Amino acid sequence: MAEGLRERKKRQTRQYISDVATGLFLERGFDAVTVAEVADAANVSVNTVYNYFPAKEDLFLDRSKGVVDRLARWVRGREKGESAAAAVVRELREELEAVSPRLGLMDGYARFMRVIHDAPALRSRLWAISQEVVDKLEEALREETGAPADDPLPGLMAGQINWVHQTVMSVIGREMMAGRNPGEVSREVLVLLDDMEELLSEKVLNYAVRAAE
Amino acid sequence: MAEGLRERKKRQTRQYISDVATGLFLERGFDAVTVAEVADAANVSVNTVYNYFPAKEDLFLDRSKGVVDRLARWVRGREKGESAAAAVVRELREELEAVSPRLGLMDGYARFMRVIHDAPALRSRLWAISQEVVDKLEEALREETGAPADDPLPGLMAGQINWVHQTVMSVIGREMMAGRNPGEVSREVLVLLDDMEELLSEKVLNYAVRAAE
DNA sequence: CTTAAATCTTGGAGTCATTGCAAAATTTCA
DNA sequence: TGAAATTTTGCAATGACTCCAAGATTTAAG
């Protein structure tokens, strides 16, 4: 069915508010910009802003929400004969080798991270998102392995896999904020990823291996 | 030097405010109690509350701050021939066997956790504390091993060790909230701890072994 | 014991995020 | 085209938190 005028306008408005807000936050920092200013700059009322975004933090982290099922998706899409952890490590390695902006390997990410780093509210929102990532990963592991609800292993495995992802993301953030360029950081984190892989036990690396056909 | 009247009064006032606030939060939940109510109930002004506590969350989580250097302390106090991870696992095992209230194994912890669970602001404050725990642990590992500032290993090891501690604490919280009693939870988590120990690689279990004399 | 300095407490005003409500504007659809 | 559904907006209110200056208390010197 074709999308009505109303739907299109809503999507545009939402996007515009988010863009305007992001611009302001990047310029002056999260705390220094009020929601009222965002509303003014976007030519809408404060209420309209809250109509689209549950909280101020969502104005800046709206995009990041595409990340919540990243690990679950990678695990579900793992190859035959590949374990959950191996799949995540492989996907991370591929993204790193491609110097992918999805991991923050892009110009401008430093400024983005700086805004988050300087605003406690944004940091906690990021933690909340990260928690969602683990939860969805654990759920995926349960489904993939058919583990009973009281089996603690999926939770433990999700924790280990999340450690890898979390560490990669946080080191990238730190290094980019330190002024390094994406290529440099990519190479450095690839080495780090090797180190991490070596720290994973065989039990982790062999958990939830997908049946080879 | 003897403590002056002023110092004593301040400490008492601070403690009293925290106690009163904790009581109210346990009764009615974090969000349902305003800072003004806490101030009233404690016979002080709102400004005095903020004089002692930087934010509302600190009224409830004041105690928890004793936890921030737990892992660093355990590592620094590890025995001869014992690694950092082994020390943390051992200390955790001892606390679990003792059904220690320091880990939340006590009646009333369920209600305490419930308040945190239901208040996003408290959850993020807990995350922040947890971050401090890792940071201090990493710092301790660097000092203990004399690793250079650019060595990534201490950070990775801190992450692995933190995973163990974090998982133990969160499972205890979850089970206690589910109405289980401390003894039960203790036994269950001891088993879980064994599982986790098996998931740690040799490299982790042998990192920062203290010289045997 | 008296008093000035240092320190605490308090009241009050103000900022800002967030919510609730009802009126006004816009879009959809019969 | 006109009523119904949906969106936008203005307005008022709540609650955390900050700033400031005045008042109360404690300390310490004389």
Image (cartoon, coloured by chain):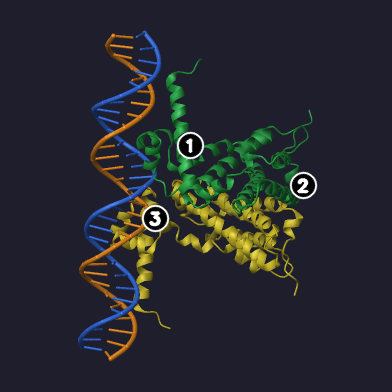
Chain colours: A green, B yellow, C blue, D orange
- What distance separates the C-alpha of mark 3 from that of mark 2? 45 Å
Q: Residues within 10 Å of mark 3 (few under 14, many from 20)?
A: some
Residue B206: where, in percent of width, then height? 75, 60
Chain under label 1?
A
Q: Which mark is residue B56?
A: 3
B5 lies left or right of D13? right
Q: Which amino acid lies under the numbered mark 3 shown in the image of this protein?
A: Lys
Residue C21 sits in which quadrant?
A: top left
- What distance separates the C-alpha of mark 1 from that of mark 3? 32 Å
Q: Which residue, given by chain and number where applicable, does mark 1 sit on?
A: A19
Residue B78 shows in this picture: no
Q: Quadrant of the C terminus of chain A?
A: top right
Q: Which residue, given by chain and number where applicable, does mark 2 sit on?
A: A202
Residue A84: where, in percent of width, then height? 71, 39
Q: Residue at x 39, y 79 (%)?
A: B3
Q: Which amino acid lies under the numbered mark 2 shown in the image of this protein?
A: Glu
Residue A196: where, in percent of width, then height? 72, 50
Q: Which mark is residue A74?
A: none
Q: Residue at x 37, y 74 (%)?
A: B8
Q: Which amino acid lies under the numbered mark 1 shown in the image of this protein?
A: Asp
Q: Residues within 10 Å of mark 1 (few under 14, many from 20)?
A: some
Chain under label 3?
B
Q: Nearer the viewer, residue D2 or B95?
A: D2
- What distance separates the C-alpha of mark 1 from that of mark 2? 45 Å
- Dot 3 and dot 2 residues touching (CB under 8 Å): no
Chain under label 2?
A
